Amino acid sequence: MCVGEGILPTGPLSGAVAGTVKFTTTLRPPEKPFLSVSWRFNGVNIISSTSINITDPGYAGRISLDRATGSLELRNLALEDSVEYTITITPDAGLPKQGRTNLTVYGGLVFIHLYRAPNLVCPIRVHESSTNLTCEASGSISSREWIKDGQPLNPSGGVSFSLDNKTASIQPVHISDRGTYQCRVSNPVSTMTATHNLTVSCEYSPCIHSVSIKENMNNCAVGPYNLLISGPSAAPQGHSIMLQCTADSVSPAHFSWMFNGNETHVYNSLYIIERLGAENTGNYTCTAKNAVTMMESSTVLDLRASCIAPCGSSSGLVIYALTLKGLI
């Protein structure tokens, strides 16, 4: 009969491949040495110590026994060392004492990579948008944790995880989903972390009902409305002219210009004329298009050349002078 089942701390113990672990008993050195100390691993005697130590050949050079307390150090750990260990101590007086504990040996984490698929393409429609973050790792993995902007990422709203916790899915994708995502894989002896910065630059979908820009609380796509070309309708020849096209639009409108019905290959809100001449006068058409709503709107500005002095003033003076000359 054995007593002292608690002479080993409650396990399991953890160790890393090629590392060292120590099975420390709760016993103090007695006044008289123990008659015998023996350790068994999976039913096989590792070491038996009486007046001499008998060590299993497979553990020669890998173990050290503290004869005074019965504690055992096991070195150069291998995955095969993961099992139950039993110690039996026979004191000089009294009943034998026995303890049991388990050891789990973990391999190192070799590789970790966090990537996203598919890539987000703008503009995206909220009800159709989704993306996955996948955490690939190899080695002895006990757990995977997901972190966003330094805080634990938990299932909520549009965020869900695969059963093995390798993949985080976001659907639909919102502006608030952008940030720094981390996948942390670990076991009791090591930890590795991979990072991915998720960028979301747009999140528009067409509004279900017609709303104005000011009423657009859901940030859905509307427009373009209220298209306007700012700039002079007349200017002296030789002057530099800048025309600017604006529109109310969510998502932002894309602009293009035409001159007298011909393409100009200008695709921004500004149209600049370096030097106004007769060849530059005519109708300038600005078109704004919303790539989400697929709506477009156009407006026209008729640009003419003006005279520095009042037009026709010099000819009037000539006619008046000729009239006076005929009267004299």
Image (cartoon, helix red, strand yellow):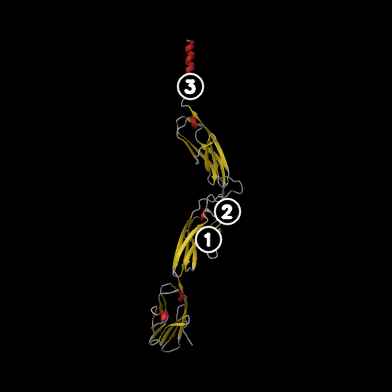
In the rendered image, the vertical position of residue 85 relative to residue 235, given as above or below = below
Towards the viewer: 295 or 98: 295
Q: Nearer the viewer, mark 3 or mark 2?
A: 2
Look at mark 1 in the image and give the residue it sits on: 168
Assess disc 2: are there few (<14), some (14-19) or many (≥20) residues with their C-alpha within 10 Å of its C-alpha: few
Real-space Cα separation, disc 3 to disc 1, in angstroms: 78 Å
In the rendered image, the vertical position of residue 249 relative to residue 33, given as above or below = above
Cβ atoms under marks 3 and 2 closer than 8 Å: no
Look at mark 2 in the image and give the residue it sits on: 128
Q: Secondary structure at mark 3?
A: helix
Circle nearer the N terminus (1, 2): 2
User: Measured from the top left, where is residue 254 in percent x and y?
Assistant: 52, 43
Q: Is residue 30 visible?
A: no
Q: Residue furthest top?
A: 328
Q: Secondary structure at mark 2?
A: helix
Look at mark 3 in the image and give the residue it sits on: 313
